[in-house]
Amino acid sequence: MIAIHTPGHASDHLCFTRPDGLLFSADHVMSWSSTIVSPPDGDMADYCTSLQILLNRSENIFLPGHGPPIHYPKPYVASLLSYRTERERAIVDALNIRPFNTWDLVDRLYSKTDLWLRMAAERNVVAHLLKLQSEGKVEEYAELWRPTSLRRAQAR
């Protein structure tokens, strides 16, 4: 068995692969839901990079820590990566309208009403915002997030 370092969900997350084409994806790729990425130990940039690493592998069945086996995992992993890209785009689009705090972004972007699911959604939003901040695309100002281009426009 070979360990593959797949940080994102957690900094020390590992997947394990066997020569027979099985990959134990644990919490990195689950079959019933997208994975929570909760800073400070979770990192959205690392998570997306780790998804790309799995896309480049040849295993044909993933055994997640939660949910049934994933047959034909490449399309599924590609859809997870696409989902994260779309969520990030939705966050930026919202911030281009006006600044938001994380809970208001959850209200705008998610339909979840269960408190536990809303808390998980908020952690994912924070992870996306921190990724976007590290890329120089957004900034936090007075507990609100806004595009960095807004600051430049105000400085003129």
Image (tube, rainbow, N blue to C red):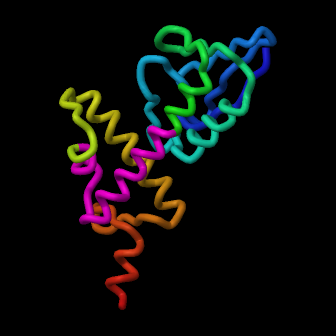
Asked if residue 20 is positioned above or below residue 118 in the image, the reply reads: above
Percent x, y of residue 6:
65, 32
Q: How many marks?
A: 0
Q: Quadrant of residue 122?
A: top left
Q: Quadrant of the N terminus?
A: top right
Residue at 57% from the left image edge and 41% from the top image edge: 48
Residue at 66% from the left image edge and 23% from the top image edge: 15
| Magenta span | 82-106
- In this picture, residue 81 sits left or right of residue 4: left
- In this picture, residue 94 sits left or right of residue 129: left
Residue 85 vs residue 40, the one in the foreground: 85
Q: Quadrant of the C terminus?
A: bottom left
Residue at 72% from the left image edge and 33% from the top image edge: 56
- In this picture, residue 57 sits left or right of residue 106: right
Residue 78 vs residue 66, the one in the foreground: 78
Residue at 60% from the left image edge and 35% from the top image edge: 51
Q: Is residue 85 magenta?
A: yes
Q: Residue furthest left?
A: 113
Residue 110 vs residue 72, the one in the foreground: 72
Q: Is residue 121 visible?
A: yes
- In this picture, residue 151 sits left or right of residue 24: left
Percent x, y of residue 104:
22, 50
Dominant secondary structure of the magenta stretch? helix
Percent x, y of residue 11:
60, 37
Percent x, y of residue 36:
43, 32
Asked if residue 31 is positioned above or below residue 38 in the image, the reply reads: above
Asked if residue 11 is positioned above or below residue 147 in the image, the reply reads: above
Q: Is residue 28 visible?
A: no
Q: Is residue 136 magenta?
A: no
Asked if residue 114 is positioned above or below residue 24 in the image, the reply reads: below
